Structures are given as C-alpha cells and as structure tokens.
Image: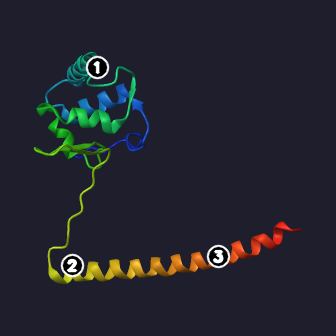
Amino acid sequence: MKIDLPPEFLVQRDCSLTALINFTAKVIKEKDEPFRKVQKRVRARVRDHQHRGELPAKEEIRPENFFSWALEFKGYQALTKVEGLPHGARVEVAGLGAVVGTPMVSVVTPPETYSALLEAYVAATSLNQSLLNENSRLKTEIQSLTIVAPKCVGI
C-alpha cells in the first residue's frame, strides 16, 4: 500500500500534533485493526513521552522531530516505507567526542561503472568551469560598478 505524504509535513514549520498522530496511526495500522484503537495507542505514547520530556509538550511540533522520535519504536517501522518522510539522523561514534546530526537526510548513490563515473565527473567539471566563468564575469561587472559609483557621489 502506497501512502502519500501530506505536503504540510514537508514544510519547515510546526504542524498539528493531531495530524501527525493520525498520519502515523494510518501508516502503522494493521488491516483488521480499528483505526481509532491505533490512534489512541499512538496518542498515549506521545503523551507519555511528552510527560517524560522526550517530546515537546505542545500541540504543534516539527514533523522531522516527530518522525525521528517515532522511528525509534519497533511498532512504527512501517513509517520507513513512506517516501520522502522527513526525519533526522543522529550518528554517534564510539571514542569520538562529536555527535553529527541533520534535520533532513539524503543519500547519494555513486555510479556503479567506470564509464558512468567518468561521465558524472565530466559533467561536474563542466558545471564547475561554467560557474567559475560566471563568477569571473560577475566580479568584473561589480568592479566596474564600484568604479562608477564614486563619480555619482559628487553630484
């Protein structure tokens, strides 16, 4: 079953906690299980974790924070099948004092063959050169404008 992500969850702002709970319940619900029962179960877990301080105790929350929290639970793994679901990543490396996190996650898959890699490299190099040329042109244009500007000041 393909479930489309509501567009309001893709915006970088707080969303209704009720909407997030309803969406989560819809995704994790088993075929023969009543929606209302799943919804109550999700809401109870949210309220419990709000009480513990693991979720903000408010009625609006950022979707990526909510889904990052929800994906930690075994029963909510069906959420991983929702394409484009906003969630954060937290990586802790033993022996290092740094923790790396990101509000949104994206994965880049490198080309698998040498010819595809070479093609990607040539395209990236070409784009880089065109950006360098445009940068040079814009620098020259800005310098010409700054030379003209002092003449206008005396008017």
* Relative height, residue 129 to residue 29 (above, below): below
Q: Which residue is drawn at 46% across and 76% down?
A: 131
Q: Disc 1 versus disc 3: distance between alpha carbons?
A: 56 Å
Give, as a three-letter code, the residue at label 2. Leu
Q: Residue 117 carries which label?
A: 2
**Residue highlighted by disc 3:** 143
Seen from the viewer's position, the closer of residues 150 and 12 is: 150
Tag 3's secondary structure?
helix
First in residue order: circle 1 vs circle 2: 1
* Relative height, residue 90 to residue 155 (above, below): above
**Residue highlighted by disc 1:** 50
Residue 25 coordinates in the image, percent (x, y): 24, 29
Q: In which quarter of the image is the N terminus?
A: top left
Q: Which residue is drawn at 75% across and 75% down?
A: 148
Q: Nearer the viewer, mark 3 or mark 2?
A: 3
Q: Disc 3 versus disc 2: distance between alpha carbons?
A: 39 Å
